[in-house]
Amino acid sequence: MTLPPVQIDYSKLALLTRKRGTCSPVGLTKAQLLKIKDETDKYLEMKWKGLTKEEAAGYRNSYQKNICIDMLQHGYHKSFCEFFTLLKMWHALREAGGIRSIFWMQTPLEDLPEKLDQMYFFLTRAEDAELAGRYEEMYNNIFALARYFDNPDDKWLRDYFYGRCFKIGQLIKVDGGRKLAEAYANLGLLHEENGNFEEAVENYEAFSDMTEGRLWQDANGHLLNSIACENLRRIYTLLAEKMLKDKQYKQAIRTLLKACERAKQGGDKKMEGEAAFALGLAYHSTGESELARSALEIFSDISIALDDAVGLSRAYEAIAKVLASQGKPMEAVAYLEKVVEIAKNTDQKRRLVEACTLLGDIYNAKGFYTKACEFFKQAFDTTGEFRDIPLVDETKVHYGIAKAHQMMTTINKFIESSDYNSLNNLLTWKENRSEFFPEPTVDKSSDSKNEWPSRQLTPESDINSSSEDEEYNY
Amino acid sequence: MNEIYPLAVPKGRKLKCEVCEAPAERMCGACTVTFYCGVAHQRADWTSIHEKICQLLIPLRTTMPFYNSEEERKHGREQLVQRQKHLIELCYKVSQKYLFEGKHEESVPAALHSLRFRINVYGANSVQVVPAYLLLTEASIGLGQIVQAEEYLAQAQWIVLKATECSDEIQSLLHRNLGLLHTAKGNYEEARYHLANDIYHASCEYGTDNIRISAAYFLMANVFLHQKKMDVAGSLYTKVTDIWHTYLDQPIQNQLHAIKKPTDILAKELENDTGLDEPQESEAIHILETILEIREHTVEEKSQTTIKILKTVAMLHYLMMNLSKAHELALKAYLLSRELPNKEEFEALRELLSLIASKNPVTLKSAKFYNQTL
């Protein structure tokens, strides 16, 4: 069947040129003309080093379109689908997140050629590997992508690729489940970051079960199983913290015991110590002081064994708190003084402040105002070195209160005795407001008798400036 | 079937053949508004499209009756455009269907009609004309007239290039045809480039897993097959199968769901409906059966994929009420799936078989037989 000619609307100019017919010899059929045109195009392409049609289209199109087309052209249709969906997903996430979502601040994904390139590279390689059935290689490629997007802006991409890794991990059979185990660990990490601790626990437990008894090591030479245990310990501790906040003490302690168990299994002493420490704190908050103390002592022993001064100071401080709440202030004081010493040696300013404040508190409560003053002063001086205004204020107040207490007793005595001499003393003090009083020694002894009857070790007679050196040494 | 004499026609009025635009010598007796140069073209037109639109052409080609008011005239003009638009769609669909059935020759007159009406309504340089050109291109490629096809395509491409805004849908169609052309010419690299463009634009329009894209993937797979890249082609065929499987599985699951629910007498029985129009159905059959054939010839231990395509084709036939065919295919898949460790697929196929049997009294017996023996 012969077909009719194509109907073309020519502009006036075109009609004129056609009539003149200078360009093309008359009498050629359209087919011949087309052929001539093709040949001319080809010639120009070869000789003139111009742009081919594809290159021209490449410049005209957007970068993401070029990548998509390149993928498809080489048969990477799965990569294309994934790539395309991810780009769409970015916009969907942005819409879903509302006006406050962080995505509004970001440059759209399609305007970041570097990221697109990375995705192109790894996705296509992964697809190659998939076609050839080399799932391990596929896993590595997708995992590399997940690592690449490991920053706060692209968190959703990283999460997505970790999810993919997990699915691929399920396909890998030859390595005895190592990749799958790693994938579980990654998923656990995701859940942990998102605050889904229960799910994170499930994933980490799977990770630990799969690595148990295997000698797999990661790139840094750590055993995977011990990493699993460490993760589990951490997540159990976090869970327990949450429970403690909700006042579910029993459950928290049960979880922490699990954490301890895992820590022991992991075989890392430091980890074990940390677990014991958390357990000790939990016991402390439920009021089971003996258990708390034994747990904390485990931590302190481990810290000593590891030569970990910081850990030791933490342990001692916690023990001191337990003792104080048990009503054994003297033992607490002993521990706290050790803490002060360690903190001074290891230059831990904050711990020093904390320990000094605690010490001051104890002395203050028991009426040893001079001692209290001294420690509060130390705390206050230390806080001056870093710019934490609320902390400075707090220690300042503590210091002030102790100071006031210290003067209070003396002034009371003066007022109570109501003789001329005392009155004179009071007046002189009022005039110059100096810190120092002519202190009659008699008053002090009675004060200490009243307020601190349980005290046996310290000399009862007096604790004024002359005897302080002794106490310090003790 | 009346003969006319060109010399007897009033001066200035030229009657042209409907198909080739040569001076006409015959007229359709039924509508008396359509002319042909000879019996051959009249017959071709009649079998292709004229039979369906003969009466519809009369109001378009006779002069408009005289209306008294401007309002009526306006209404009359609007009605005319409406009718033309309707015809455009009709001719387009008919032509498309012929193409999918492989009847290229029949599709040409219908496509020509669509083109003509499009030019009338939208103007020769509008983007709306492109689909008609593309139909003609496809038909020409099918007929092996590459040069002719190129000419049509060049025209279409030029229109698209000139248009400032062109929808993704038309872009995708254009690139699909360019892909087809280059495949026919053996320029596989370029064919792949254009098909890639096609898939991209279609994805922008419909999303990546729409059944409308399956054709492009299918063509792409064919190109890879020609280039002897079996693994890529296989992966693409799987993709096409998956797309269709997901699409067809939906109504089937609905039906199964309805059966499992406690019977409600008032509830209407779900009817078999693919949700596709005729061209799409014939396209689906063409694509899926080709894949099935390829799979059966190249099968090596890949029974999983074979089962899937068998099942998909069976589902399609079932939804189109070709029950015996559906039964035959589903049974084949069922027997294959028995050897697989994965019992899920096996169950799904059994459900499908029972569903097919429930619609067809003839196969009901054999289905029971199989259910008993297994």
Image: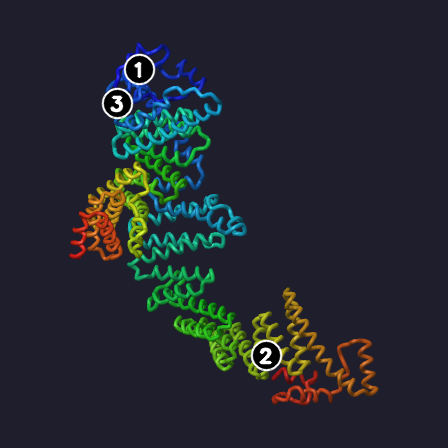
Q: Nearer the viewer, mark 2 or mark 3?
A: 3
Q: Position of residue A354 (x, y in %)?
A: 60, 73
The answer to whether the residue labelled 3 contacts the one labelled 1, judged by CB atoms less than 8 Å apart, is no
Q: Amino acid at mark 2?
A: Glu
The span from disc 2 to disc 3 (Cα, nearest Å) is 108 Å
Residue located beneath label 1 in the image = B23
Q: Mark 3 — residue?
A: A1
Marks 3 and 1: which is nearer the front?
A: 1
Q: Are marks 2 and 3 in contact (CB under 8 Å)?
A: no
Q: Which residue is mark 2?
A: A337
Which residue type carries mark 1? Pro
| Left or right of A12 in this view: A369 | right
Kind of residue at disc 3: Met
Q: Is residue B368 visible?
A: yes
- In the image, are marks 2 and 3 on the same chain? yes
Q: In terms of secondary structure, where does tag 1 sit?
A: loop
Colouring scheme applied when the structure was drawn: rainbow
